Image: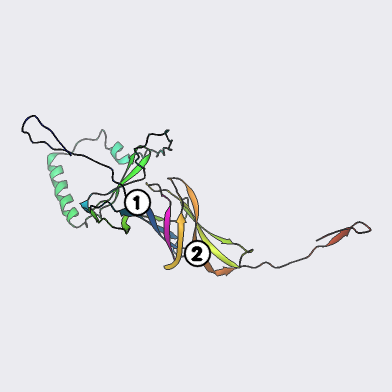
Amino acid sequence: LNIFSAKDAEIKIDFSYLIQNTYWNMLYDVRASRENGRLGLSVYGDVYQKTGEDWNEVKLFLSTGSPSNNVENPSFYPWYLNAYEYDEEKSSSRGKAMPSAKMKKAEAGAQEAYDENIPAAIPQTAVSEKGAFVEMELPLRQSIVSSDRNQKKFIKEYSFIPGKELNFNYEIYLWQNRSSFITAELTNSTDIPWMQGEAQVFFENEYTGKIQIPFMPSGKKETIFLGKETRISAEKILVKKYEDTKGGFGGKRRI
């Protein structure tokens, strides 16, 4: 970076740049329990960077967008709108009489004493929309060395209960085997889109394998497999056989 100045001066310069040999993917842990009626989803960012420089104690932002310098025909991306949430508490406070200074001081002292007994909140990933994309700012500074290995970073954790967002179902494929499988019909009701990625599945605290989570924007519903349900099996049994013939000579036989 070459800078020219006609006279001596002190300045602050902020600059940004794009580096190759770096990318990230979403990874997931799915922990489901039919007995407890819950499904937990942990979302991770699997970061790869081999830029030749280590990232030490940096603020890490993960974006669902794809920056590009190529000049090409415009691509159109969907915008997902969220319903406005009405804050009843703020609205009801309008028009009320303001408390006196003594009341404010007493309330402040009581609040400070109450706050001392409350444990500090766990830092959470901040999510913000950047146009058609979503940007996630990890709460803690990260160190990611330049390496051939991917490095897994925790983003957020979500929990679902049966209802509009989650339904457990059983599926059986008798033309293949007698086993039954349990599936989860899951709707993405979170604040981030789920990018396509690999998920480790744990059902009733047992590891059942890996599946692929498809791309799921907010509001999208998909069915994901959780594993075999060993308590249920099925078989096809001939209950009754119907047979008749039509025609006199060389007639057709129907079964």
* Identity of the residue drawn at 62% across and 67% down: 234
Specify the segment rendered in magenta: 194-203
* Identity of the residue drawn at 23% across and 49% down: 59
Residue 113 or 9: which is nearer the viewer?
9
Residue 155 visible: no
Q: Quadrant of residue 251?
A: bottom right
Label 2: few (<14), some (14–19) or many (≥20) C-alpha neighbours in 10 Å: some
| Residue 168 in picture, x, y percent from top left | 50, 58
Tell me the SS state at disc 1.
strand
* Identity of the residue drawn at 70% across and 68% down: 237
Q: Which residue is mark 1?
A: 24
| Number of numbered labels in the structure image | 2
Please say if 83 is above or below 198: above
Please say if 235 is above or below 49: below
Residue 227 is labelled as 2
**Residue type (three-letter) at the residue carrying disc 2:** Gly
Residue 5 visible: yes
| Residue 37 in picture, x, y percent from top left | 45, 61
Tell me whether the residue at label 2 lies in contact with that at label 1, contact meaning CB atoms closer than 8 angstroms.
no
